[in-house]
Image (cartoon, rainbow, N blue to C red):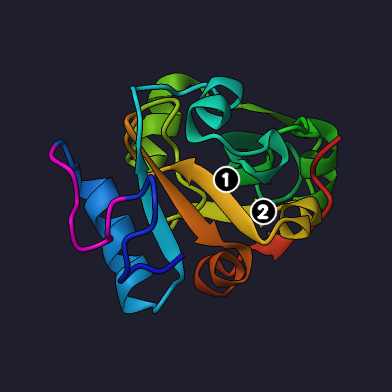
Amino acid sequence: MSGRARAAGTVAAGEVPEGGNAASLRLLRLLEEGGARFGLLEHPPEGQTVRASALRGYSLAAAAKCMIVTVSGGASGERHVLAVVPGDRRVDLDGIARERGGRRARLADRALAERLSDCVSGSIIPFSFHDDLSVLADPGLFDQPTLYFNAARLDLSVALAAADYRALANPLVVRIAS
């Protein structure tokens, strides 16, 4: 897998399929410039992790499920995090609230999630390009050598070496999945 070489079922990183948006182009530029080992997979539009994993042909455990969470209460007031967990796990909202020093955590409403991520619902990427959105990643993500996630588009996915994701996204790695 390489951002520079075509593998079966992938599109070379330099050959972005039509339909790109600002977030997908920014993501692909980050991966290219960061020297990441990745590939692109075109598929019918899908935003549900279970169905997208089936279309990609890879294990649900290798999917990077991304959710925007709002934490409230505590000294810091309301704040937002991008929670990234393995696709076969659930986001632990109570754990996120504790980790961020809040009393309560809830999934952000769709409009807020789309504004903070610059992605349509179902295609949120495991990277943050917004100052008000910190990234938390569950350590279980790194049990897989390759992570799969939508490329800020419902019809295109990224296969990214987990070590490269960790280096480029620099998430706070804490247990946030149940």
Q: Residue at x 61, y 23 (%)?
A: 50
Q: Which residues are magenta?
A: 11-18
Label 2 or label 1, whichever comes before in sequence order: 1
Disc 1 element: strand
Circle 1 sits on which residue?
A: 82
Disc 2 element: strand
From where the camera sits, is residue 125 visible?
Answer: yes
Instruction: Give the numbered dot on residue 10.
Output: none
Q: Left or right: where does residue 109 sit relative to residue 107?
A: left
Find out whether the residues at labels 2 and 1 contact each other: C-beta distance under 8 Å.
Answer: yes
Report if residue 17 lies within the magenta region.
Answer: yes
Q: Quadrant of the C terminus?
A: top right
Q: Residue at x 42, y 25 (%)?
A: 121
Residue 67, percent across and down? 58, 35
Name the outermost residue toward the left.
Answer: 18
Q: Left or right: where does residue 37 sit relative to residue 76?
A: left
Residue 15, percent across and down? 18, 56
The amino acid pointed to by label 2 is Leu
Residue 142, percent across and down? 73, 60
Circle 2 sits on which residue?
A: 136
